[in-house]
Amino acid sequence: MSSRAVLLERALPLAILVVAVVAVPVMILSPTGLGRLSGLRQERTKADEEISRLGQQITELRAEVKRIKDDPAAVERVARDELGLIRQTEVVFQFKE
């Protein structure tokens, strides 16, 4: 083996180690490193919470739709509360405060 091959065999791993020692901290501390990773984790946590909240809201709305489909009293309650409807036989009195 030539002296050049021996030098290359010893220097190459050392050069790779030096590059890694310099490059890894630069990559970690760069704007796309750990700071961004932390921000993305927080963003994912917020998204997961929003998904959970919306899932609960969907469940509640489905239950309300089922009640309205199955229960005539629920339909009347919605018509009165949300639409302000009254029966034909009812009289509405309005008082000034």
Image: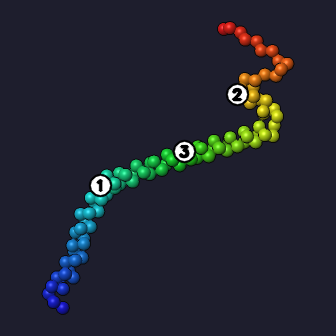
User: Which of the pair 27/93 is nearer the observer?
Assistant: 93
Residue in the image at 77% along x and 15% along y: 92
User: Which of the pair 21/5 is nearer the observer?
Assistant: 5
> Which of marks 2 and 1 precedes in the sequence?
1
Disc 1 from disc 3: Cα separation: 30 Å
**Residue 92 position (above or below residue 27):** above
**Residue 23 position (above or below residue 47):** below
Q: Secondary structure at mark 3?
A: helix
Q: Which residue is mark 1?
A: 29
Disc 3 from disc 2: Cα separation: 27 Å
Q: Amino acid at mark 2?
A: Glu
Is 71 on the left-hand or right-hand side of 84? Answer: right
User: Which of the pair 92/25 is nearer the observer?
Assistant: 92
Q: Residue 71 location, x and y as percent?
A: 81, 37
Q: Residue 96 location, x and y as percent?
A: 68, 8
Q: Which residue is mark 3?
A: 50
